[in-house]
Image (cartoon, grey):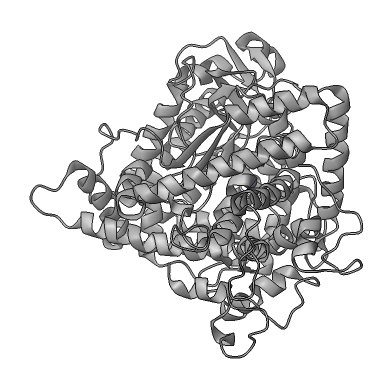
Amino acid sequence: MNSRFLFALIAPLWACCAFAQQKTVDPTVDPCVNFYQYACGNWMAKNPLPSDRSRWGRFTELSDHNEKVLLDIVQGAAVVREQRSPLDQKIGDAFAACMDTNTINQRGMAPVKAELDRISAMQNMPDVVAELVRLHRVGIGVLFNFGARADAKDSNRTIAGLAQGGLSLPDREYYLKTDAKSVEIRQRFVAHMTKMFQLAGDSTENAAQAARMVLEMETILAKASMDRVSMRDPNKTYHMMSRQEVAQLAPNFAWDQYFQATGAPAFQTLNVSQPDYIKQIAVDQANSSIESWRAYFGYHLLRQSAPALPEGFENEAFDFWSRYLSGKKEQRPRSARCVAAVDRQLGDLLGQKYIELTFGADAKKQITQLVDALEKAMAEDIRTLPWMTEETKKAALAKLKAITNNVGSPKTWRDYDKLTVARDDYFGNATRAAQWAYNQRIEKIGKPTDKTEWGMTTPTVNAFYSPQNNSINFPAGILHTPFFDPRRDMALNYGGAGAVIGHEMTHGFDDQGRKFDGDGNLRDWWTATDGAEFDKRAACIANEYSGFTAVDDVKLNGRLTLGENTADNGGLRIALMALQDTLQGKAEKVDGFTPEQRLFLGFAQIWCETTAPQEIRARAMTDPHSPGRYRVNGTVQNMPEFQKAFSCKAGQPMVSQNACRVW
Ligand SMILES: [Zn+2]
């Protein structure tokens, strides 16, 4: 982005005053006491939470920058002119339709009227099943999820899958916990739904009754749902069944009617991720009144459609979901929300334009070199691990070698030729895009898995590991400052992008990833002793992070965040190994910092953030990632290498008495 960050980062420890206003580092803090505060203190002081955010950090800083690039692209494309390319027509008109609030307000409830009428007209279970499919086909996730996914034990084939779903609140615990805050959240949720129904034309009394019915129905679903920690275990969510077995498991539901209407190619077997859930809801739901179904479907339709309805809906949705639950004070500008809508609807078209402007061949080459260096370091790390036998090491190295590295963008872009985008129809565009995406997915059932597909759009500031593809993927959106800059100090790139690459690689070997082999199949390739040794070390990490306080009396869940924390710890260590290997003993200081110190600072500073307490509370229950401060302090306190780099002494907070290490 700009050079100020680079300047701030390499400012010497002792230069407290001359550049104090420019710096990210807070030199008044001892790095051995609180490294996060040291590395980010000044950034946090200069970055109060913007009123339209619940979290503001280095990731959002960069995504804001990307958003400006995208806004330029879509605004340019939206100008109607002769010989506008088909690509520009689509992304430009999608943006213009979203910005056209006059038309949206004028249309009122018209866009959803037909669907609401169908919902009100439902009389019996066959009607409910027919409507359930209709909603699923436009991306509204009610009752359960059905779709195409790679077979966990045979990743080359794509199969049908059923999984739990259909909750509005972020997690099952929101419906089940009995503490005062949880009770209050549910009351506010009911009040919010009441307002949504009123906006749609219901009387106060009917609206309030419908809202209570939705809460009741979702509470039933929540009780039947598997918890998040269990869902992290791929063995617990693998249950291949024939259609006949599904019918026996949950006989009160018209599966043949449902599957037939999904438009899926014929299939005989499917994976049922949570059989207990499917079994239970079939029992409960057959007993639910038709009024409950109408209320439940009606609310989900209104919620999903809110941005395309008169502004009262979006304001009400914002008020509950963003202001109350996440702590945002105001909405993002309409233009920002519309850029996000285009990214959602036409991600690969927008991505093509974005990457042309922002990501050169040079950057790609350097990132690829960085990935190679990290891979080499990870191999060395595995070879020298003290706790693993040769047999398992051999298998781990084979898996590492088999990882596919994807940098920048997917190999092939999705083709949106058959998707119609109209300049005056925001609701229609969103619905058609959701239908189109559904159809694209569903028709893959029974076909070989396309392992080159990405789960993120190109401008996204994030990265991911896919256990079934055994691939690490870095969208162009993240490959900029503060993560990476081809012109800056290498140690900072190793601490930023290098640690992110190491993090994604380590995901292949965390508590979840380690259960898949190099071909992306769920198969145990560990000796029993090595598996037990892994579990022992992972438990150390889980205990460590469970001890951290998120906010007030809310602690982190070390089991929920285990995979991410393991990846942070492994990723930073192999980034350091890779840097040291590249330096070959050269230890040139830059403005007083050794290369190792700069690497640790580069790492810490990608996690600087300011977060609303409501958001921290919600994330502690749902987010597998720890908050920034623990991603930094939780990791460095396990590393003797860090203590050496900053000359920390035993007994200081950044020197763990009981250092954990998996990788
Ligand atoms: Zn991760």
Left or right, 162 with respect to 662, comes to left
- Identify whether 216 is placed above or below 512: below
Q: Does 82 sit left or right of 581 as displayed?
A: left
Q: Which one is in front, 542 or 99?
A: 542
User: Where's residue 618, x and y in %?
Assistant: 68, 57
Left or right? Give the position of 278 relative to 115: right
Is residue 153 left or right of 82 when viewed as pictured?
A: right
Q: Whole-percent x and y of residue 295? A: 56, 44
Residue at figure coordinates x 77%, y 77% from the top left? 30
**Quadrant in the rendering for residue 626:** bottom right
Decide: is 358 above or below 54.
above
Q: Which residue lies furthest to the left in this view?
A: 82
Q: Where is residue 294 in the image (x, y as percent from the top left)?
A: 54, 39
Name the residue at 68% across, 25% down.
282
Q: Between residues 644 and 456, which one lies in front from this camera angle? A: 644
User: For residue 263, which quarter of the picture?
Assistant: top left
Residue 438 at least partly seen: yes
Q: Residue at x 61, y 66 (%)?
A: 588
Residue 458 seen by the camera: no
